[in-house]
Amino acid sequence: MKKQILFTIAAALLLAACTEKPKVDPNSKPEPKKTVSVPNFNADSAYQFVAQQTQFGPRVPETDAHAQCAEWLTAKLGEFADTVIVQDFRAKLFNGKGIDGQNIVGVFNPEAKKRIVLCAHWDSRPYADHDPDEANIHTPIDGANDGASGVGVLLECARLFKAQALPEKLGIDIILFDLEDYGPHAEEAEKYYNDDVNYWALGSQYWAKHPHIYGYKAYYGILLDMVGGSNPNFPKEYYSQGYAATVSNKVWRMAYDLGYRPYFNNELGSPISDDHIPMNEIAGIPTIDIIDLQPESSNECFPDVWHTLNDNLEHIDKNTLSMVGNVLLHVLYEE
């Protein structure tokens, strides 16, 4: 064995001696390591996008406020995206009635094969069925946090995609889902409970079956829901971790690197039926839900303003918008 080893070493040394070594220029400098330039998220701008949505009034489907907001969202997204697609659809509500909805899609870098979906819902709850004042439980809400905050963050991201080009091989599709929040009133929830039917997230259910481009595929998706409240708690939502743990872990690692660990915690959150469910189960796109969950809340596991008249602009925190926006931008530009 020793002889064989010695022979092998000797042969290797001889081969190395006979091999011409590449010439090195002593004045040459090593190539600098590529650095990624990530745009700065503007929380003031995102806040204004949230404010504009609430100024139309509650964005309840088939109302004037809803129609006006749809027109504004389409025009605003059109300022930034390469293409905007408005997807009109009709869905069946929990009570059997039909209702019209609109999904609004902004396409960035349409030629890129590697695509990522960013999404949020833009409609608002037709009744404040969790309001502490019983007189308010049938009154529509502004949905500043529940709906408008996620859209506001995505619109600011869209503005920055236009200002500073995305990585060349990366394409982004921003999808604003309609009819997410038109589930049954809390008073009737038990009556309509059915394991096989999801009366919520109607816009994403429709899109998952009929994407804006036939045969559409994406690398992964990120859903934003209730991302504007003060002192948020973003755990790894249960279904997100089950369907798309790789994506979830990637996003939370980035949040830690940016110093947001107290808010993006490593706990497993409650299972939430949201727009990411049809994205995963029907469209087959591994999608996570960044959502504020408050385990100590008396309002189920959601922030105290959830589905109340207090879900208004007064309770939107620019710091939270900034935090979520910065995480998104770093994940995408460093992809």
Image (cartoon, rainbow, N blue to C red):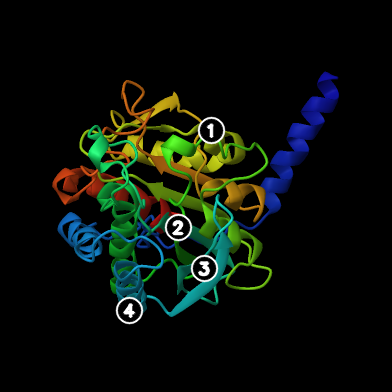
Crowding near the residue tagged with mark 4, few <14, some 14–19, many ≥20 C-alpha atoms within 10 Å: few
Looking at the image, do the residues carrying marks 3 and 1 touch, with CB atoms under 8 Å apart? no
Q: Secondary structure at mark 2?
A: strand
The quadrant in which residue 239 appears is top right
Q: Which mark is residue 75?
A: 4
Amino acid type at mark 1: Glu
Q: Of label 3 and label 1, which has the lower sequence position?
A: 3
Question: Where residue 63 appears, x then y in whole percent?
Answer: 35, 68
Question: Where residue 117 appears, x then y in whole percent?
Answer: 50, 59
Answer with left or right where residue 52 lies relative to residue 18: left
- Tag in front: 3 or 1: 1
In the picture, the quarter occupied by the N terminus is top right
**Residue topped by disc 1:** 190
Q: Secondary structure at mark 1?
A: loop
Q: Of label 3 and label 4, which has the lower sequence position?
A: 4
Q: Of label 3 and label 2, which has the lower sequence position?
A: 2
